Amino acid sequence: MASTRSELEADSWAFALAIYAKPGVAEACLTLQNEAGVDVMLLLMATFVAVKQRLLLTADEIRELDEACLPWREQIVRTLRAIRSELKTGPRPAPNVATEPFRSQVKALELAAEKLQNKLLAECLPLRLPETETVTLEQLRTVLKRVVAHFVKRRGVQPGANFSSSIDTIVEAAIQDAC
């Protein structure tokens, strides 16, 4: 693990920003967020600790991390996201050129709130030794499937929903980043 929680926080945030910017990853994350209720920050943290720290989060650890950040995510992050999204279509005077700077400020606040959630997640990560020398594609895929399954269960999404393509996009980008 990183030598301090603050290093872990900084490294995981930089990783999240880098992975999210890779081709197809933002779309994959948003698909999982919108269709399965996945917390993207938790998903990216699970990816980070697998790829960079070689820790494969268990279903219980994913649940504990979710519980730790649930109030912040629900009350702050999702509220800011809803406001930003609402400004795309209205109410009056939005959307227009005059309201776009305000929407940009809300977007910056949403990103700052996600960074604070990342800090919370870093503080709550289990501390243990790496489990493996390197993480395979299949191991990372398994961890991300656990994250998605946790949120699918919470949201009550149809069991037949298939999110493999989105998971694979994130796995491939993360493994490339690790090399």
Image: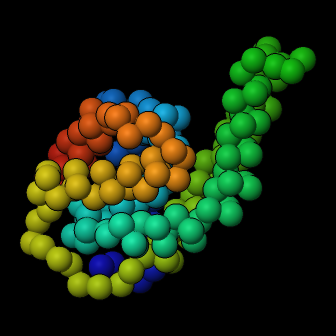
* Residue 25 visible in the picture: no
Residue 46 or residue 3, whichever sits in front: 46
Q: Return the residue nearer the eye: 127 or 110.
A: 127
Q: Tell me the colour scheme of the image.
A: rainbow
Q: Residue furthest top?
A: 96
- Residue positioned most to the right: 92
Q: Is residue 54 visible?
A: yes
Which quadrant would residue 164 be assigned to in this image? top left
**Which residue sits at x=30%, y=51%?**
145
Q: Position of residue 1 (x, y in %)?
A: 30, 79
Front-most of residues 40 and 10 = 40
Could you tell me residue 73's position as x and y percent?
64, 56
Question: Would you place residue 55 above or below residue 151 in this image?
Answer: below
Q: How many marks?
A: 0
Task: Answer with the quarter of the image where residue 82 lies.
Answer: top right
| Side (left or right) of 170 relative to 75 | left
Image quadrant assignment for residue 150: bottom left
Residue shown at 52%/53% (left/top)? Answer: 154
Which residue is at 81% across, 19% downward? 90
Image check: 91 left or right of 81? right
Residue 60, horizontal then vertical, whole percent: 39, 72
Name the residue at 36% across, 84% down.
127
